[in-house]
Image (cartoon, grey):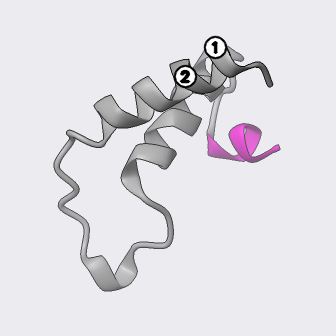
Amino acid sequence: MIESDRLRLRVLLDHFGLVEDEREPLRVAHPLPEVLLLVVCGTIRACDDFDEIVE
């Protein structure tokens, strides 16, 4: 991955970090900004559901 791509991902993660995470802290397996980033990437790739995003 080139540096400009890393910077773009960092900017997205920073923006998603502004979203309030209302989940119960003890039940959180993954940080919300990372989950949101994966969902956006999956949407861009035309994934239909979370199973496709995981693949």
Considering the numbered disc 1 on the image, is that residue within a helix, a strand or a loop? helix
Prevailing secondary structure of the magenta residues: helix
Mark 2 and mark 1 in contact? Answer it, CB < 8 Å: yes
Where is residue 27 shown, x and y percent of the image? Answer: 38, 80
Crowd rating for badge 1 (residues with CA inside 10 Å; few <14, some 14–19, many 20+): few
Where is residue 53 shown, x and y percent of the image? Answer: 70, 38
The image shows residue 43, relative to residue 25, as above or below, that is above
Crowd rating for badge 2 (residues with CA inside 10 Å; few <14, some 14–19, many 20+): few
Disc 2 marks a residue whose amino acid type is Leu
Which of the 4 image quadrants contains residue 13? Answer: top left
Disc 1 marks a residue whose amino acid type is Ser
Indicate left or right for 4 with 40 as reference. Answer: right
The label on residue 4 is: 1
Tell me the residue at 28%/78% (across/down).
25
Nearest the camera: 6 or 20? 6
Query: Magenta segment range?
Result: 50-55
Residue ID for mark 2: 7
The label on residue 20 is: none
Quadrant of image for the C terminus:
top right
